[in-house]
Image (cartoon, coloured by chain):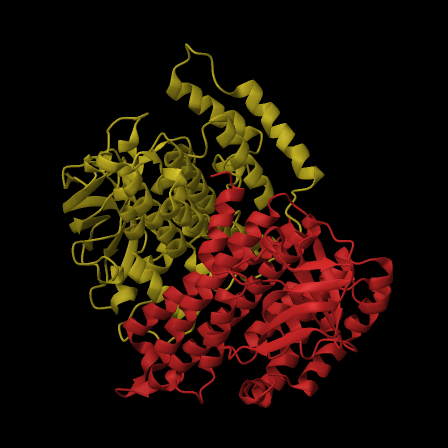
Amino acid sequence: MDLELGSAYEAFRGDVAAFLGSHWPPSRDADPKRAAAEFRQAAVERGYLYRSIPKRYGGSEQPADPLKARVIREEFARAGAPKELEGPGVSMLVPTLLGRGAEWQRERFIAPTLRGEIVWCQGYSEPGAGSDLASLRTRAVLEGDHWVITGQKLWTTVAHLADYMFILVRTEPDAPKHGGISYLLLDMKQPGITVRPLKQMTGGREFNEVFLDGARTPADWIVGERGQGWEVSRTTLKHERDTVGGATRTEDMFYKLVELARSAERLGGPALRRDDVRQELARIEAYVLAQRYSSYRQMSMDLAGQDPGLIGVLNKLNGTQIGHRIANLAQDLIGDAALSMPPTGRGARGDEKWVNQIMGSLGVAIAGGASNIQRNVIAERGLGLPRDQGDRA
Amino acid sequence: MRFLLSDDQLDLQAAVRDYALERGDAGARRGAFESDSGFDPEFWQGLMALGAGGIGAPEDAGGLGLGLLEVALAAEALGYAGAPGPFLGHVLAIHAIALCGSDDQKARWLPRLATGEAIGTVALAEPGERLRPANWEARLVDGQLAGEKRDVLYPELADVTVVGVTDGFALVEHAAPGQALTPRDGADRTRRLTHATYAATPAEAMPASREAADRVVDAALVLLAADAFGGARRLLEMSTEYAKTREQFGGPIGRFQGLKHQLANMAVEVEPARGLYWYAAHAYDRCSPDSPRVAALAKAHLADVYMQTARAAIEAHGGIGYTWEYDAQIWFKRAMFDFAYLGAPSRHRERAAQLSGW
């Protein structure tokens, strides 16, 4: 059992830090967007970003090394330097195209997606198809050399900014549920598409409803074959899976919570001196440490090519539960600041910013598979209990 | 970085688990539970013959010379199997003598304890929840011990008892006069407890420092956490197995989402806690400055997780889980032991808070 990275990785850390020292931050009069793009390009050339992606598609094509990936994440975070772009284009579409896309699709879409020149949204959920996604009803019919798409998508993050959508549609209405779905690519800038924002309970507006009324896309903008869309959508790349990131984020939040308890007043004295606050903080810290060291264990299993087993399916629910605990204690500690809406704008200060966690922890609980769905997955895949009567895949 | 067990560590744990499971399920666990003494000599001798007693004993004393992590892996396996007997007190006595004893004391006791030829135990807690060396009031004056200790594991069987005193530790031999031993009607009948009063009892001083004595108590907390993880894991598996085989309404009850979610919630509590107890043992072996704090957090957390898992497991079994005949109650009571022995979770959380400078 060894928690040290070892001298080779510490030397690598020195290389990354030296690169960052000479490339970030940019000079103060530089255009921020352009500076970030130039920085990312230099980082790709050094092999620090987009490591799983072949060079011919704009990646740096490095052998999988989760420890190097971790060092890079840590050093980039320390320097506040731009990381790989986030969002459904980089995290979902690019791996799907690498796994299942046609060559022309990879050449046309991957590099500009990595550079942020084109933005994607994900067309999966529908009003009647949430957890039961495979019951989706948006139809696509091939008319000549184009697909014609009619239906509605929901919870579509950044649809109002997106250039393209990757979308699951029903193309084989007579086929069984999962076998009737295809995975298409679609230009968002066309008359058959209407995007309407959905305001969240936080006041934010990242979600949308997307109405498709005869939207068109060329016949060959399909990924995989007709009727294979369900499997195509589940393509993931096992390159340098970030098993530690979730635990690190939770830990950062926990240390902020300790600082909050240090500064907050309770009944005329520091909150941190109160028994109930100390007890709850210590309780939460044990959960945070448990998550950290099980993520190290899981990462070590990945490195050793072992199946992580049960822990692999319960990370999300575990992180969600800790987030709830942190939200609950913070809500008590901030007193009447908890009567506020979350502050808007970057760099918000004051106790009100904890309202983001009070509400946002619920977003985490729901997005990407709500907690009750996670419990089904843990019970069925993790513990081997009988599957539900439904026909979930 | 490799936060995984080595093949040797896995083999060691599997050997202890296989032995304890096979013998335990064949009757050793239930037999000891129902017996007057809570001790199964044959089971114990087999465990010692495997080398489980000497895992943490120095090699020159015939032990394996391994760290607390390896002892904890064995404790986890025994917790999983619900193994009866004086293991916890025995390995802590070895640890205390190895850490705090004189050369002569080590030479006299460690070889016999490592092989299981002799049995050892520790007497730590005192009435009024005086749980740590700084609070101990038992005194050794001119070779005579006076004081009162609570919840000593199997002192009636022990050839030697390591007793916590104001300046560290003292050794008391089995036949020493002036000992009054009063067994407790303990809930956990696989690990029997006795209150001990010493009055002018001949005892031998150990050259222990307060810091070394503190470390022995921390080691006990880590071993309790390890036992708790093993037991909680077993209860999760028992409950899952029951859900797969018990049929109602024309099929296994494990197909019902209500039960699935309860079992999933148990899994989310239990499985990540492994990382915490591993780290607590690892930090202890490396003498990390964080070790006392993490030992306290691990004991508090694992004890709570075990107890809550045991409650959920009994409920998940329905009526059968509440009977004396069914073994779930044995683990429930082992969870009660791990919860309260050497201090309930809230005490350890407060200690961790103090050690954090909160």
Image spot of residue A284 (x, y percent) = 42, 49
Image spot of residue B23 (x, y percent) = 63, 86
Q: Is residue B198 above or below residue A219?
A: below
Q: Residue at x 51, y 80 (%)?
A: B185
Q: Name the residue nearer the viewer: A14 or A164.
A: A14
Q: Is residue A278 left or right of residue B34?
A: left
Q: Residue at x 33, y 87 (%)?
A: B247
User: Is residue A11 among what the camera can see?
Assistant: yes
Q: Residue at x 53, y 56 (%)?
A: B298
Q: Residue at x 48, y 27 (%)?
A: A40
Image spot of residue A293 (x, y percent) = 54, 51
Q: Is residue B119 above or below residue A173?
A: below
Which chain is in red here?
B
Q: Name the residue nearer the viewer: B112 or B168.
A: B168
User: Is residue B4 among what the camera can see?
Assistant: no
Q: Is residue B273 left or right of residue B322?
A: right
For chain A, the rendered hue is yellow
Q: Name the residue nearer the viewer: A293 or B126.
A: B126
Q: Quadrant of residue A37?
A: top left
Image spot of residue A358 (x, y percent) = 27, 43
Q: Name the residue nearer the viewer: B56 or A78.
A: B56
Q: Is residue B293 above or below residue B41?
A: above
Total of numbered circles in the picture?
Answer: 0
Outermost residue, top side: A29
